[in-house]
Amino acid sequence: MKEGSSLDGGVTALVWVGPPGGTVLEMRGGEMEVRDLSIIGRPIGAEGRAGIGILVTKPGKGIGSGKHHFPSLHIEDCEIAIQVGQKPTEHNCDNLVFGYLTVTNCGYGLRVMNAMGMGFKFDYVHTRGVGEMFDFWGGGNLWVDAWKIIAGNVGIHIRDEPGFVAIGKNNASYVCNNLKLDANSKEYKLIQQDGNKPALIVLNHGHIANKVSLEKPFIEVGGNTCVTLRDWYNFKIGKIVAHEIDGVKPNILLDRCRLGAFTEPQEFLIGKGYLKLRDCMVGVTTVPVPDVLIEK
C-alpha cells in the first residue's frame, strides 16, 4: 500500500506496481460480479501511473461482453478508472450495473469507446478530483440514481470522434438524478457536447452549493439535442451555451427550478437555441418566474 492510502471495511485491494499505462484488471466474456474491491494506481506525476483500472472488452469475434455487476467499487489514481471497449467496431461491451462507486484522482471515470455503449446503470457515484467522469466516444445509454461531485472539470462529455458518431448516434441518452455539486467543485461543466450527435439529456433534482462559482458554462450542447433540468436549486444565470449546427438548434427546458441571481430569462441562454422556463421561482423566494419560451 502506498503512503497516505487507507482501506477499511474488509475490502480487497489491487495495487498497481507495473509499468506506466498498464491495465490493472481486464474483464472478458459476460455475467461476472466484482464486489468490495479497491483499485489503487499511482498519483499524477508518479513513475509508472496505471493507464486503466478496469477494462471491459470482448474475447473474440461474435462473442459479446458485459452484463457485469459491481456492487461496491473504489478506484483511485488511474488515468482511466473504467474503460468499455477498445475500438469503435467492438460492439456489445455493455449492460454494466454499479452499486456504490467512488472514483478519486483519475483523469477519466468511465470511458466508453465501443460504438453503441448501452446500458450503464449507477446507483450511487462519488467523484473527487476526476477530470471527466463520463466520457462517451460513441453512442451512450446512461442512468445515474445519485451523484455527488467534489472537485473535477467535466461531468458528462459527449464526443464527436471520427468513426464513432455515425454508428452510435441512435442511442445517445443520459439521465442523472439527485446531483450535488459540493462547494469544492468551484467551476464545473456538467455537460460538454461536441458536434451534432442527437442526444436526450435529463437532469433531475440538482443542488449547486452556494459557494460554487460557475464563471464558465455549466452546460454546453449543440444541434439536435434536448436537455431537461427539473427541480434544481441555485441554478445560476447565463450558464447554458447552445450551438446551432447545420441549421438545427438545441432545445432546453428548465422545469420547477429555483434560479439564483435571476434578472431576465434571456440571460440564461448564450448562443443559439430554444429555452423554455416552466414553473420556476426566483432564488429561495416564492416569487414565480413567468413561463416563457426564448429563441435565440
Image (tube, grey):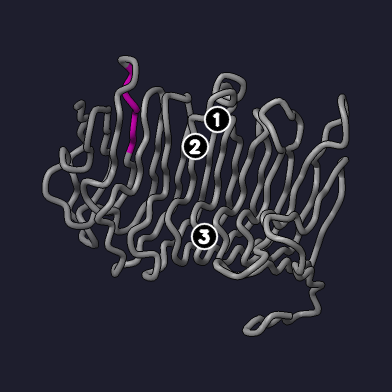
Q: Mark 1, residues whose alpha carbon is within 10 Å: few (<14), some, or many (≥20)?
A: many
Q: Which residues are magenta?
A: 248-253
Magenta-drawn stretch contains 219? no
Q: In this rendering, would 74 be left or right of 18? A: left
Q: Which residue is mark 3?
A: 130
Going from N to C along the chain, the mark reached first, 1 or 2, is 2
Q: Which is in the foreground here, disc 1 or disc 2?
A: 2
Going from N to C along the chain, the mark reached first, 3 or 2, is 3
Q: Which residue is mark 1?
A: 172
Where residue 5 appears, as percent x and y from the top left, is 66, 81
Where residue 48 appears, as percent x and y from the top left, is 67, 65
Compared to 289, does 173 lie above or below? Answer: above
Where residue 168 appears, as percent x and y from the top left, is 60, 25
Q: Quadrant of residue 265?
A: top left
CB atoms at circles 3 and 2 under 8 Å apart? no
CB atoms at circles 1 and 2 under 8 Å apart? yes
For the view shown, which residue lies furthest in the top direction? 247
Q: Amino acid at mark 3?
A: Val
Secondary-structure class at tag 3: strand
Q: Which residue is found at the position 73% from the left and 66% from the top?
A: 39
Q: Which residue is mark 2?
A: 158
- Mark pair 1, 3: CA separation: 22 Å
Q: Amino acid at mark 1?
A: Ala
Going from N to C along the chain, the mark reached first, 1 or 3, is 3
Magenta-drawn stretch contains 251? yes
For the view shown, which residue lies furthest in the left direction? 263
Q: Quadrant of residue 271?
A: top left
Secondary-structure class at tag 1: loop
Q: Which is in the foreground here, disc 1 or disc 3?
A: 3
Secondary-structure class at tag 2: strand
